[in-house]
Amino acid sequence: MLQKLIYSIFICFFCWNNSFGQETYSDVKIARDTTFTPTEINPLAPATAAFYSAVLPGLGQAYNKKYWKIPLVYAALGTGVYFYIDNKNEYERYQTAYKLRISGRDDEFNGQDGNPNVSDDGLIRAQEVLKKNRDLALFITIGLYALNIIEANVDAHLDDKAFNTNLSFRPALYINPIDNKAIAGINLKFDF
C-alpha cells in the first residue's frame, strides 16, 4: 500500500511539474500592423473566381491575383490538347490507310514489290491504340479544365487575409515520464 502511495505521489509530482512548466507571455507585447475583421473577406469571391475560370481558363487565377499560375494552366491544357490532336491525326491516318487497303487501292504504308510495311492487322491495332490514346487525352484535358476551376475556387477560399496569426504548428519531441522514452508529436496551438 505504501509503495502505491509513493508511486502516486511521484506521478503527481511529475504531472504537477509539467503542468506548471508552461511559459507565460504576459510581459511580451506583440505589435500588429493590421487586425483581422470578418468584413474583409468577400463571401462571393470563390464563386466569382470559379465562374471566371470556367469562362476563360486562367481568368480565375488572375482574379485571385495569382498571376504565376496562369502559364501553368495554359501549359497543362495545351499539353492535353496537343496530345488529343496528335492522336486524332494519327488515328485518321491509319484509318484512311486501312480503308484504302480494303478497297484494293494503294496506301501510304504499302511497301515495295507488294510487301506492305504495316499489315492489315497492324493497321487495325494501331487504330485501336490511337483511339484509346485520343479518348484518354480528351478526358485528361477535361479533368485539367475542371482542376483549373476547382483550384481558382479553393484559392479564393484560402485568401491570405483569412488566416489567423494566432495559429501555430510546431513538431516536437517529448519524453514520456513513465518509461523515459522519446515520443514524437505535433503541437498545434490555437489562440482565441
Image (spheres, rainbow, N blue to C red):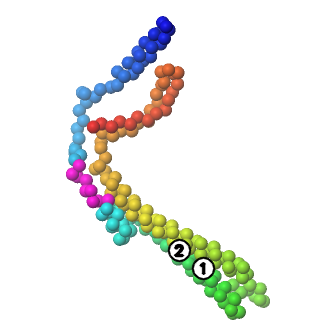
What span is colored magenta in the figure? 38-46
At 59% from the left and 72% from the top, the residue drawn is 132
The image shows residue 22, relative to residue 12, as above or below, that is: below
- Which amino acid type corresponds to the residue marked 2 in the rendered image? Tyr
Q: Which residue is mark 1?
A: 91
The image shows residue 68, relative to residue 138, as above or below, that is: above
The foreground one among 30 and 184 is 184
**Where, by quadrant of the figure, is residue 155 drawn?**
bottom left
The image shows residue 109, relative to residue 183, as above or below, that is: below
Work out how far the residue at label 1 is from the one at label 2, CA to CA, in angstroms.
10 Å
At 78% from the left and 89% from the top, the residue drawn is 113
Tell whether position 43 is magenta.
Answer: yes
Secondary element under disc 1, as helix, strand or loop, is: helix
Residue 164 in view here: yes
The foreground one among 5 and 21 is 5
Task: Characterize the local packing of mark 2: few (<14), some (14-19) or many (20 or more) Cα atoms within 10 angstroms.
Answer: many
Secondary element under disc 2, as helix, strand or loop, is: helix
The image shows residue 100, relative to residue 151, as above or below, that is: below
State the image coordinates of residue 121 (x, y, percent, origin top left).
Answer: 72, 79
Q: Seen in the image, is 129 located left or right of residue 169?
A: right
State the image coordinates of residue 34 (x, y, percent, origin top left).
Answer: 22, 45
- Which amino acid type corresponds to the residue marked 1 in the rendered image? Tyr
Residue 79 in view here: no
Q: Which residue is mark 2?
A: 84
**Where, by quadrant of the figure, is residue 28 drawn?**
top left
